[in-house]
Image (cartoon, helix red, strand yellow):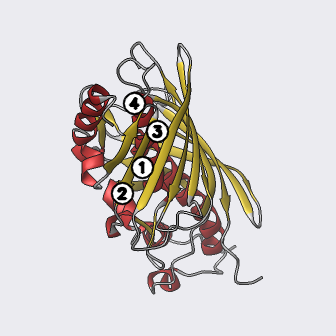
Amino acid sequence: MKRPEPVQVVKQRRDAALAALVRGVPYIEFLGISFDRRGDELTAVLSYDDKIIGNPMLPAIHGGVTGSFLEIAAIIQLSWGGLWDELESGRMTVETLEGGQRPKLPKTIDFTVDYLRTGLPRDAYARARVSRSGRRYASVHVEAWQDNVQRPFAEAVGHFLMPAREDG
Amino acid sequence: MAQIPDKTTIAETFQNAIPYAREVGMTIELLEDGLAEMRMPYDARLVGDPETGVMHGGAVLALMDSCCGLAVIAHPDVPGLTATLGLRTDHLRKAVPGQAIVVRAECYLVTRSVAFVRATAWDDDRTRPVALSTGTFTVGGQA
């Protein structure tokens, strides 16, 4: 029987792949969004900053920032699913990723945001679920919460155009 | 703009006091009853695809949301402020890198509880929209 890979090797490969996916997208950095990984599960984290406020009187996070956060969480989750398979099967290596060959990101076709509650001035989290990922189109549902995961403050659904695959 | 100075003052004060809008340089270009136009300059920090320099769809979404909300506030039948209930955006094409985005939003119906808005976004080419949105917003009461 084949011995399982050492835990550090596995961890390092997966973390490096996630970093390569997210790194270098200016708008993700501008909004202060990062990603936590547990196995293949991703949680997007929007770190609070005064500049994301949209209503200084409440105060509340800007609805557009909330929408962007959801859209970014959806796009990264969608890419991550494909990247994970490529990486774990050995068809893609971390070296190619780190060599600057970052995967092309899916394009948003349409995105519908439902604002459920006020976004409070503190960190927010989001998880996306890919409802369908086809060769050309994908449908993604995404939810964001703050204090209580059972009480999301916004959710969204969207359609995405998948990048053309090089293997045809 | 002259016929609704109070709304204009409210809206402009409101926009200037919004940290996110100020951070990305959103400006109000036009404000009439239920009608608003806002502009956001091209900014390398808002890029979603580093290979092409195209701004992120989310950055356009944020301008759409702001401009729709402003059109609602500027509607004569809407007392006070508003909050977004839902917003759908269709991304029709990539915005050209280097060009500002302009959004025109129209609040076309206000009921006792809901304001309905549609909006269009363009870059320099006003004949081909970059994105279209439809949204619903709260009217009256605490958002």
Q: CA distance from mark 3 to mark 2?
A: 14 Å
Q: Which quarter of the figure has residue A91? A: bottom right
For mark 1, does the 10 Å Cα neighbourhood hold few (<14), some (14 to 19), or many (20 or more) residues?
many
- Label 4 marks which chain's residue? B
Q: Is residue B13 left or right of residue A89?
A: left
Mark carried by residue B63: 1
Above or below for A137 versus A86: above
Q: Position of residue B91 (x, y in %)?
A: 60, 57
Q: Earlier in the sequence, mark 1 or mark 4?
A: 1
Mark carried by residue B40: 2
- Label 2 marks which chain's residue? B
**Which image quarter is the C terminus of chain A in?**
bottom right
- Label 3 marks which chain's residue? B
Say which amino acid is labelled 2: Met
Q: Earlier in the sequence, mark 4 or mark 3?
A: 3
**Which image quarter is the N terminus of chain A in?**
bottom right
**Residue at disc 1, secondary structure:** helix
Q: Earlier in the sequence, mark 3 or mark 2?
A: 2
Label 2–label 1 contact, CB within 8 A: yes
Say which amino acid is labelled 1: Leu
Disc 4 designates what residue? B74
Query: Which of the pair B10/B17 is nearer the observer?
Result: B10
Q: Residue at x 44, y 82 (%)?
A: A98
